[in-house]
Image (cartoon, coloured by chain):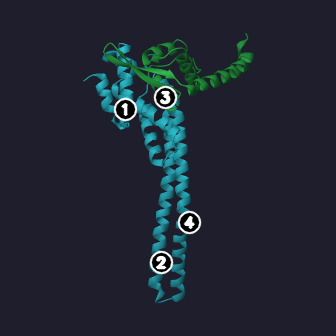
Amino acid sequence: MSIQTPTELLDGTVLAILEKQDLYGYALTKEVKQHVTVSESTMYPVLRRLERCAELTTYSEPFEGRMRKYYQLTQEGREHLIRIKTDWKNFATGINEILGEE
Amino acid sequence: MSYLDELEGYLHALPRNERDDMMSYYEEYFTDAHIDDTLANQKFGSSKQFSRRLIADFYMNEDDAVENKPKHQLRMIWVVILGILASPIALSATIVVAFLLLVVIGVVLSVIVSVMISLVISAILAVFSIIAGIIILFSSLTGGIFAIGVGSAMIGLIILVVPLLINLTKILISSFAKIIKLIGRRYIQKGANYEA
């Protein structure tokens, strides 16, 4: 596929998944992969950036004798997600009108 | 030595907290995804290649986030070039990327070097002119004063022009940084996908 997922949409995908539930790195990557093509090393920079912008927070929970880091949406994250959704709706409508129909 | 230990060693170019964060992410990820050393090599390439892409990624994002000094930008440019070299790229794309890099580096370097050389030469000429002026002064007053005047005027001009040139160099470096980031984003992200 020659269309690459832009950063903004990748952010949106991650935020939308985390809106439903808190997840740890591997589970989140698997979930993202169901929707967009990403490599396994694409996720870390995305998470790190969102965490820095305070759109995500993290907490650790014990699992089989080790700690797992969970990512959780913050209020800023929710607001960003709403903005991305609106932008996407506008964008998709425009493109669909011209490319969506056979 | 395990893949992750090697990786941590290669990541020493990163700030401490960043490296720790990255390592704990990938340690957890490798355990959860059941990635052993062989699989890691298949998925991410050698630990050295993987580390170079991670470092390039980090500095590109860093460059977006903060107001940048040319020194930081030069380091970013360097690690991104290493990152691109450590990415698997289709042959045709490699040629394009190599060509782009060569052209851009060539232009930037030649501008900087030629400016430097002309500055140094005019400074030398100015100093010579003043010295010559002082020597002539005793045999020909007007000639001596004229030569000293020319030399001083050149030094004055250099002093005026230097800040301009420094700014120009800064602009050159940051546009170079922008171009390199574009190339890096395009090819390192894609290249990160060893599974494909």
Q: Are marks 1 and 2 on the same chain?
A: yes
The image quarter in which residue B12 lies: top left
Q: Which mark is residue B130?
A: 2
Marks 1 and 2, Cα distance to the nearest angstrom? 56 Å
Which chain is represented by cyan in the image? B
SS of the residue under disc 4: helix
Marks 4 and 3, Cα distance to the nearest angstrom? 46 Å
Q: Residue tagged by mark 3?
A: A51
Q: Residues within 10 Å of mark 2 (few under 14, many from 20)?
A: many
* Quadrant location, the N terminus of chain B: top left
Q: Residue furthest left?
A: B1
Question: Residue A33: where, in percent of width, then height?
Answer: 50, 14
Question: Residue A53: where, in percent of width, then height?
Answer: 52, 32
| Colour of chain A in the rendered structure image | green
Residue at point 73%, 20% (across, down): A94
Q: Residue tagged by mark 1?
A: B19
